Image (cartoon, rainbow, N blue to C red):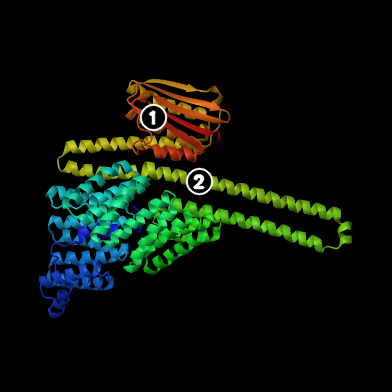
Amino acid sequence: MKTGRWAVSLWGILFFFAGSFVQAQAPDSLVTYLKTHAPTDTTYIRAMDQAVFTLIYKKADYPRADSLSRQMVDVATRLSYWSGLVAGYRNRASTNYMAANYEQALVYFQKTVDAVEQHNLPPVMLYKALGNLASGHEKLGHDEQVLQMALRAIAIQEKYHIKPRMPVPHRLIGGTLVKMGKKQQAIPYYQEAGVIFREMGDPRGIAIFENQLGDFYMDLGQPTAALPHFRKSLAMSRQLNFELLRADALDGMAQVMNTLNRPDEGLAYARQALAIAVRQQNQLGITTAYNTIGALYQTKQDFSQAETYLRKAIDVADNYNFRDELRKSSQHLANLLGQQNKYQQAYAFQLRKNNLTDSATLVRTNAEIERLLIQYETEKKEAHIRLLQKEKQLDQEETNQARWQRNALLMGAILMILLGMTIGAWLLNRARVQRLQEAIQLRQQIAHDLHDEVGSTLSSISLLSGHTDKLLSENRPETAQKMVQKIYIDARQILESIDEIIWTINPGNDSLQRIVLRLQEYAQPLMESKQIAFNFYVDSALDQLPVSMEVRRNLYLIGKEAINNLIKYSEATRATLRFERQNSQFKVVIEDNGRGFDADQLSSRTGQQSMQQRALAMGGKLTVRSVPGQGTTLELTSAAI
């Protein structure tokens, strides 16, 4: 999910941080009790726990909360009160978490789990501790650990029938699956989290979950679907007088408007979020609001204002060590400066962002840095060539006219040689830069495809393998067999993905004819399996038409997606795939006589948005015509490249 969403992060851990022995006492009476009693019994630790809770979530006084939490750990250890020790570690973790010190928070989350297991405390405490640990890993981008801890928490809940259930593990799994590119697999986990929120009957939790659903649809690239959830969250936050969530929902609305290219509306929401953060002295909220406002001004092409707000975001994030926001703001500013051709400054901020990024994203970041560096070096060399030419011109003007006439022939020859060498060097360097850029682009694409198509599936296989071993040890062979079948399907998917990547980058496939053959090989057996009469037509004028790797890849993926949708949803008895040539363009038509659908209502299930984006990326236009009961026609038109 997105970084900088402070209310969501807060409530995501509040469900777990509510200790089993926190009492509802007034803050003043707590202070009086702690001052007048010696730390000699468990009642004192309970009072300390309530005081820490107040310092963290009502006063945001993190230094005092951390100091009191350290005392809790010492007193609980001396009294051998292990539940109190867990509470002390939990409070130290929550203090660092809320202060955005996520690495330190993770250390104490792990200590909480270790203490519960070491002292054999009740399963419900391990359930909560594992949820906390998963939240800590999420903030540091440790996707595999998030899945492991959250799945383990759910398994403990199911084994011991712990009530009430907590929604956070399901939400964390859903968010991690979205990051891994498994968006459809994430939907059931989000739905289950919603069920649990409503089971709890907590309006604050429901309001925050609506905000999280808005974030989820933004991750899916569906801003119009995200908008009603942010609006509902905003309305509920006002009813509940929940200012922190209100600021979060306003920021979500601003990001939706920015995505929909309505930056003026977005600025109105973002400024309201900033006002709330300033009023509450919420430095993390202020950083997020500055970042959002900077992005909105960038959309408005007001680069000066955009740079001002992004630099403010960086200053606050740097001052308070908000690593997530610092990484995000540095990347935004690097993009903004690169858009203005300020490559040297852009490189500096890109490098800073790179130093804050973990190894899982370094491949793409390093490629981006290399691209910026090449552009900067190219412009510097071109400027140097222009300077040399100007100096030569000045030298020529200062030369004595008579001497120039005597040596005209010689000087002309020398100048021609120098000019030829300069131009040759410039052209050679330019060609080298172009080849480097093409190589970087190819490497980045391969890394992206391998990460999205193979890496996440391998992680899934690893997790499923471990779970299979556990099921076998528990003598549950039927369930284990299902897991093995899923591993087999995932492995087949990896082989198909790698085959497609290799086919895409193979220069021997750089013709439209090869794409046509591959789509026919892909479609024919699927049509036969559904008993669909399939007609295939190719204009002979297209046989040897060359296409670039990027066009070939997008064209094949659009065709594959369209064929899959036809097989899954159309219920057709006849289908046709045609490749035609129209002047300097080629056209691909896929049509069927199936049940059709309302083309005005976009569906994430059929991947229409993804196909539209791929069509734009290859410089083409995708048109979908469909009427319920009258079949569907998909038409892709593109220039021959």
Task: Inspect the image, locate mark 2, and give the three-letter code of the amino acid beneath it.
Answer: Gln
Secondary structure of the residue carrying tag 1 is strand
Image position, residue 108 (x, y; %): 25, 64
Q: Residue at x 40, y 67 (%)?
A: 316
- Residue labelled with disc 2: 441
Image position, residue 171 (x, y; %): 26, 50
> Can see residue 220?
no
Q: Residue at x 16, y 60 (%)?
A: 116
156 or 550: nearer the eye? 550
Secondary structure of the residue carrying tag 2 is helix
43 or 267: nearer the eye? 267
Q: As displayed, is residue 441 above or below residue 305?
A: above
Quadrant of the frame with the C terminus:
top right
Image position, residue 268 (x, y; %): 40, 58
Task: Inspect the image, locate mark 1, and give the three-letter code of the amino acid beneath it.
Answer: Ser
Task: Tell me which label, 2 or 1, sits earlier in the chain.
Answer: 2
Would you identify the image quadrant in which residue 582 lies?
A: top right
Looking at the rendered structure, which numbered label has been put on residue 626?
Answer: 1
> Label 1: few (<14), some or many (≥20) within 10 Å?
some
> Can see residue 235?
yes
Q: As displayed, is residue 350 above or below residue 551?
A: below
Q: From mark 2 to mark 1, how far is it between C-alphas?
A: 37 Å
> Label 2: few (<14), some or many (≥20) within 10 Å?
some
Residue lying furthest bottom: 36
**Comparing marks 2 and 1, which lies closer to the viewer?**
1
Q: Residue at x 37, y 23 (%)?
A: 593
